[in-house]
Image (cartoon, rainbow, N blue to C red):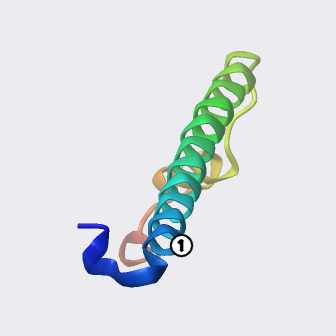
Amino acid sequence: MIAALGPYAHFILLSYAAAALAACGLTLWVILDHRQLRNTLAALEARGLTRRSARAAARLASETPLETRA
């Protein structure tokens, strides 16, 4: 297999390995960051803080539709 890649086989294989390592590292970073942000958000919500989007949704749900206003 390595002979089929020619004289630059080691460079090609190292390049693929570096790209795979970088992709795995970025994936791991995103997973760990997501976990940390989810835990931070849960802690804030446990303290009573809510998301702006949740407040806006609650406000929209409590309003009457335009058709019934008159």
Reply above or below: 34 against 22.
Answer: above
Residue at 47%, 58% (x, y): give it: 20
The residue carrying pointer 1 sits among few (fewer than 14), some (14 to 19) or many (20 or more) residues within 10 Å by Cα, namely: few
The foreground one among 19 and 57 is 19
| Number of marks in the rendered image | 1
Q: Is residue 32 left or right of residue 68?
A: right
Residue at 54%, 52% (x, y): give it: 21
Residue at 76%, 17% (x, y): give it: 47
Reply above or below: 4 against 2.
Answer: below
Where does the image place residue 31, in percent across and percent down from the top left? Answer: 54, 40
Where does the image place residue 30, in percent across and percent down from the top left? Answer: 59, 47
Q: Is residue 7 left or right of residue 15?
A: left
Residue for badge 1? 11
The amino acid pointed to by label 1 is Phe
Quadrant location of the N terminus? bottom left
Kind of element beneath mark 1: helix
